[in-house]
Structure formats: C-alpha cells, structure tokens
Amino acid sequence: MKATFAMLAVSLLVFPGGRASADQAGRKHAENELHALPAVRVTVGLRDADIIGSDNRALQAAVDYVGNLGGGVVEVGPGEFLMRDSLHLRSRVTVRGAGERTVLKKDREHRSALAADGDFGEAAITVKQTNGFAIGGGVYVASKSQRNFHGVCATVLNGRGNYFTLTRAMNADIMVSDGGFAATAFPVISGYNLQEARVESLSVDGNRSENPTKVDGCRTAGIFLYRGDNCVISNCVVRDYNGDGISFQQSNDVKVDRCIVERCAGFGLHPGSGSQRPSVTNCRAVGNGDDGFFFCWRVRGGVAEGNWLEDNGGYGMSIGHKDSDNFVRRNTIVRNKRGGVYWRAEAEAMAAHRVTFEHNIIRDNEGWGLFVDGATDGTIIRHNTIEDSGDGRQKTGIRVGRQAGRVTLEQNTVKAARDVQDDRARLPAEIEASRAEPRFWLENMLVHHRYTWDEAATVLGWSVEETKAKAAALDISPESKPSANMGGKVRALPYPGGRHPRIGFLDGAVDPQRGTKVSLLPPWKDGGYVVLDLPEAIFSNLGLTYLAHTHIPTIWSSQGVTITNVDWTRGADGSLRSEWRLPNGIAFGAVVTPIADGADCELWLRNGTKSKLTEMRTQVCLMLKGAPGFTEQSQAGKEYAKPLAVATASGARRHVLLAFERCGRAWGNPPCPCIHSDPVLPDAAPGERVSVRGKLRFYEGADLDGAKKRLLAELEVHGN
C-alpha cells in the first residue's frame, strides 16, 4: 500500500494540472460523455485502501490525484481522520464516506497574537508563539475589527523562526494594535473557486472543546465553499464546530440535502453572500448557537424545503439583505430562542422581496412565529400551521412590521394569544406627538434645523401641501431666523427625526427613535447643531436591554416586543427630561440642562425587577452631521482619552468636548461621524436608582488643553 501511495504522488508530478490525460474534462462541450466524465476512483482508509493514512494528508493526496485527472470519486473508508488543515476540494471530484462511520475530526487549536502587522496583500504572518504552527497546517488570521470577509484562512507553506508564509494573502491590514492573531482554525472541508464538487456520506467533528476561537461563516465552517458553483453536499453530519455548520459564499446552484448540523457555535445552515439559486432540502439544524438557517446577503432564487430547525440560539430562520425571490416550504421550525422566522429590518432597496412561505409548521418559538420586518414587499404566507402548543412561549403568530409593503396571508392555521399583529395599521407614536403640537415641531424643524418641506412632511405624516398649509396658518416659514439663545444659554431641542442624524453607517441604525436624541446648537455663528443620543444603548447582565434604533437584536425584539418612542419633556428653563419604562419594570431616562457653553447631563436607571442588575454598559453618542466643519468621515480632528472625547472642526478653532463619569470607553465611528463617552452605570439592587453625570462643552479658541482641564475639573474625575 505504501508503494501505491508513492505511485500516486509521482503521478501528481508527471501530470501537473492533469492536462496530459484529461484535456476534455470540464469542457462545456466535450467530445463525448466519456471525455466529459472521467471514471477515476481511489480509496482512502486506515487499512485495505489505495492510500493508507489517518489524517488530512492522505485524503488530500487522493483528492488532488483524482482532480488532476479531470475528476472522479474518492472513497473514504470508516475511521477517524485527524484534520490539521482543510480537506481542499477539487472540481468534479466526489468525496464519499461510509456514513457516520467516516469521521473527519478537527485537530486541537493553537493560537498566538501577531508579533508584526499582517499587511493587506501580504501572504505571511509573524507570530509571538510558534507552538502548533506547522508547515502544511491550516491557519486563520484576523483581528478585533477585521473579521468576516476581511479575515483569511490559508495553509502554511514555509517558515523561519516565528515567520510563516501562506497560500493566501491578507484581505485587510491585520494590525497588532487591533488585537491581530493567528489560530489553527479552518474549515474541516473547504472548496475555493471550483465547480461540480461533491461531498457525500461523512461526518465532521469540529472538536469544539479543544477549539476555543469562534470563527464566522464568511471564511470558515465545518463544511465551507467560496465560489463553489454547482456543488453538492449530501448525507453529511457536522457537529460541535466553533462556527457555522455548513456555509457557502458567492457560490451558485449549490445543493445541500439530507445533512445534519448540531451543536455548532454559529449558524447551522448558511447560504452566504451572493449565492444564487441554492437548494437546501431535508436537513436538520438543531441546538446551534445562532440561527438555524441564515439567508445571508443577496441570496436569490433559492429553495429551503423539508428542513427541521429546532432549539437554535438565534432565530429558526432569518432572511434579509436583498434575499429576494426565495421559496420556503414544508419546513418545521420549533422552539428557537429568538423567534421563528424573521424577515430582517432592511430599507426598501435592500429588503427581501417576493418571498413565498408555504406549508410550514412553526411552533413554540420565543415571542412570535413569523415577523415580517423592514420595507419588505410581495411576501406570500399561505397554508402554514403557526401555533403555540400551550406553554405561552409563541405569544404572537404573525407580526407584520410598520414599514412592510404587501403581505398576502392565505389559509394559515394560527393558534396564539395574538394571531396577527399588523403594525402598519398604527400611526407611529412620533407622528401622533408631532401632530399634537404642530407649532413647536414645525418651528423646530423649519427654523432651527432647516428641514426641507419633504422632511417636515415625513415627520408629521402629511403631504407637502398639507404641511405648507399648516405652517402658513401658524405663520412659520423656513426663511425665519432663529431667535437668540434663551438667557444666554445654548439652545437644546428635541431632535425631530425624519432626517437621519448620521451621514454613513446607516444600516447600523435603522429606524432611529427620536426620543433619546437632543439637538444642541453651538454658540458660534452658523454652527448648525449636534445630536446627542442619550442613551444610544444600554447593556446589562440581561443582554442588550435597550437600543435607540434597529441594528442587532435586543432582549425585546427577540420576543417580538416593540419599545414605543417617548418624547422629551420640555422645561421652562430650556432643560429636557426623558423617562422610559421597559416591560420588565426597568425605567431609565436623562436630563439635559443647557448652559452658556454647552449642557450638563444626567443618565439614570431605576431597577424595577426582582433581581440585581449588573454589567450596565451604556453608549452615549454625539453625532456631528449637522455641524459645519465637523462632518469629515475620518478620525482627523478627533481625540480620545477616557473619559474625554473631542472633535475639532476642520479649518477652524472650534471644538466639541464630551465626557461622562464612570466612562468605560471613549471612541468614535468615522462613517457616522460621531464621538462617544460611554459610561458604565453602577450595579442596581431591586428598587434602586443609579445615575451618572456628563458634560458637553463647545469651545472656540486656541487653548483647547485649558478647555479640557476645565471640563474634567467640573466633572471631578481627573483622568478616570
């Protein structure tokens, strides 16, 4: 058998690329069917096989040999094969195991911080600890911010000391300062830039207990394809992978059939970005950490049929960004922890349109069975059974979001405390509040914020003509000049909404609530306004407890509960106060008191639950879109030294300073652009009220250091 292995290895050298004997294979129009489908067959096993071995090298030798001859079958016998790198698939090669008796087990992970930056385009890494990094082994390179498609999976080709060359280059700058690392994490089976490969009848053991780094499905999974067209994955099992179970990215016409994905840390089944016409049928995704079935971005023309999605940590199924013209039928979706099936909150151009959802069983999921969110249109929901079996978990059968377009509901059997909740029939709270005080809001929008008529009409829910008529009746005009600051104070106004307070990263703040946002008008001429989001978010030991827009799931959205906007209460002294009450008894709010050069702030929370609240991180965001000179989408002119965040106008000695006590992080997000001083609230016992103070200051002049010192002295934190 060793001689056989050597003979195959020599064959790889004699026929590089397989062209000597397979020049017709893979052609669209081969000379005849024998040329088109080479019948090469090689067996691999622990014994009694053409190639004898127990790790990825034996499997890879067989796959490469058959691939170089134009295609065929690699049959893998029973036994456990230790995977120190991916099994790299080849076009027109079928890898066929002996069912669950053939196990490809991921080797234990080794990980090291990078000792030098991995530059974009550099096919090499320099690590601090070399233990476990070996030539021929697989590796994953990423950092805190550069993951997903920006990370890279590769094979180590060579090395000297702590420097290793790789088969693939960096997709981004992987910086030491950003926590850059390398780990021996990789897909157990992967295929890049190939066609008509097949994986059949085998099992993948992700060995999660010895692989602590969770990796995402954009670059890795138990079984992973990238640009793998017309490939088939059938009768396979993936268990305990620290990432997605089965993921394919930018891969067209992929078929996944009769596969099982269990106890993986990420998504179970992940038809990935740009994958057209996928077919995922008769599969089981059970007990995975995130969604059982995740339609990623731009997945179109697909079929999800006959699948069983149960007890997953996310949604049973979610569908969203440009995922249009898909068919979901005859699936069973039960007891998933965030909800049954979620159409994600996307704007109209990015929403999932014309999805047909039929003949499915949706039972006992958390909060709701189906939630059609976002500006989705042309959705058909028919002939489904959507029920709560009696434990009260699936409180709402079908929920239709406020922005949704046409949704057809036909012959569904629904059993829930509330069969259908259609938010489209409701007038949004912001519109009701704006119509109740048209004088205040029209002056706020047209005079102080210089809204267009279209923007003002959006806030009031009227036509432009109706809005103009109302403004004329109240003698309010966009040409009116703002009055002077009240009593020498900076003007603080409730932000009207209707105009997004960010320039960029809009998909990270869909449908922002205005009730946490205050506009502060700088004291200098033509200063525009900045928008303080107080708070943008509150995290606690319960999870994401409040978020002032739609982006990632909160503890409420996962239950199908909507937190309705609450506007600010205006004081005679120009101050603004807010108070929000959450369904579990938690109340929170803020006070913004304007002064001559800015505003003093308080953020508070009262624990109305029966348990202690801990780990209460918040986000306080100051958005700069409306302030001339501060709109550059970069870190230029920004300074961060906890608790202080500072933005400086381009070409002027104008500065905005923000600081909160108990600051956990001072930072900024250039695409918005914005700056943050994010306080951590003290732990709160049941019934206890806790709070933090903050300061916002406008300063025009050359002594910025002096302005910083004065603010910190006022806050009495002195470098905290």
Image: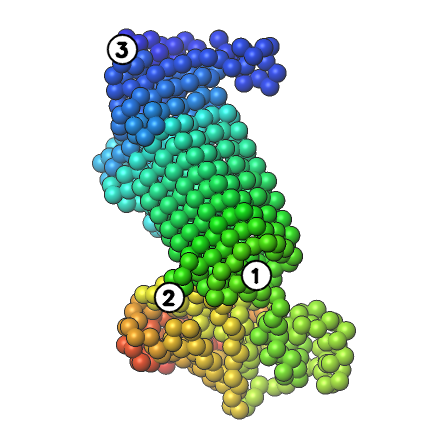
Q: Give amino acid for label 3.
A: Met
Instruction: Give the side of residue 305 with respect to residue 365, left or right.
Output: right
Q: On the image, numbered disc 1 is attached to which residue?
A: 400
Find the distance from the CA under tag 1 to the CA under tag 2: 27 Å
Residue at 28% in and 42% down: 208
Q: Is label 3 or label 1 in front? A: 1
Q: Give the percent coordinates (x, y) of residue 253.
A: 55, 33
Q: On the image, numbered disc 3 is attached to which residue?
A: 1
- Mark 2, Cα crowd under 10 Å, few <14 / some 14-19 / many 20+, is many
Find the distance from the CA under tag 3 to the CA under tag 2: 61 Å
Residue 510 in sight from this viewpoint: no
Q: Nearer the viewer, residue 261 or 631?
A: 261
Instruction: Give the side of residue 196 with respect to residue 99, left or right.
Output: right
Q: Nearer the viewer, residue 232 or 397?
A: 397
Q: Give amino acid for label 2.
A: Phe
Residue at 36% in and 70% down: 679
Q: Nearer the viewer, residue 216 or 31?
A: 31
Number of marks in picture: 3
Q: Secondary structure at mark 3?
A: loop
